[in-house]
Amino acid sequence: MAIQNINSVATNILRPLEQKNIQSPNTQSQVKFSDFLKKSIEDVNQSQIDSDILTKKMANGENVDLHQVMITAQKASITLQAALEIRNKVVEAYQETMRMQV
């Protein structure tokens, strides 16, 4: 077995990926990052609103299942915590990038 130059190996591996990237801009399946971010924030907000609505209904004495209220509250809490952790990682990556010397 002959040892190949790393550049030729990398070129053979990346060539199919480059061809896919050339074809992909013509498709409509691409989502802008800003649209993705906006939808994600709206989903987090909607889960908070759903939790508030069910909590208010339970506090007002309406017929609401306690289990559903607790599940919705936990779901809202977890989505908010995940969003905050993602934000923290993005800020940390930005700060690390800004510290790099050119």
Image: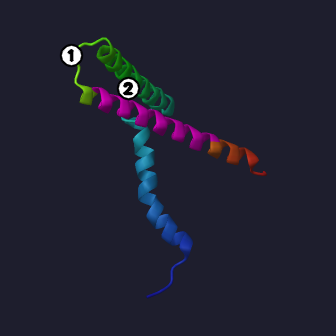
Taking the image as drawn, is residue 28 in sight?
Answer: no
Q: Which stretch did the figure color magenta?
A: 69-91
- Name the residue: 41% across, 24% down: 48
Give the quarter of the image for residue 78: top left
Question: How far, Cα to Cα, is label 1 from label 2?
Answer: 20 Å
Q: Is residue 77 above or below residue 42?
A: below
Residue 26 sits in quarter: top left
Residue 29 at what x, y percent from top left?
36, 35
Mark 2: which secondary structure? helix
**Closer mark to the observer between disc 1 and disc 2:** 1
Q: Amino acid at mark 2?
A: Ser
Local crowd at mark 1 within 10 Å, few (<14), some, or many (≥20)?
Answer: few
For this orientation, the residue located farthest to the bottom is 1
Q: Nearer the viewer, residue 54 or 88?
A: 54
The percent position of residue 18, horizontal first and vertical second, equals 46, 53
Q: Is residue 80 visible?
A: yes
Residue at x 27%, y 13% (from the top left corner): 61
Relative image position of residue 75 (x, y in whole percent): 36, 33
- Is 82 a magenta residue? yes
Of the image marks 1 and 2, the number of the one nearer the N terminus: 2
Where is residue 30, by image quadrant?
top left
Image point (26%, 26%), residue name? 66
Q: Main secondary structure of the magenta part?
A: helix
- Give the quarter of the figure containing the N terminus: bottom left
Helix, strand or loop for disc 1: loop
Q: Which mark is residue 47?
A: 2
User: Which amino acid lies under the numbered mark 1 shown in the image of this protein?
Assistant: Asn
Q: Residue at x 55, y 77 (%)?
A: 5
The residue carrying mark 1 is: 63
Relative to 7, say whether 87 is above or below: above
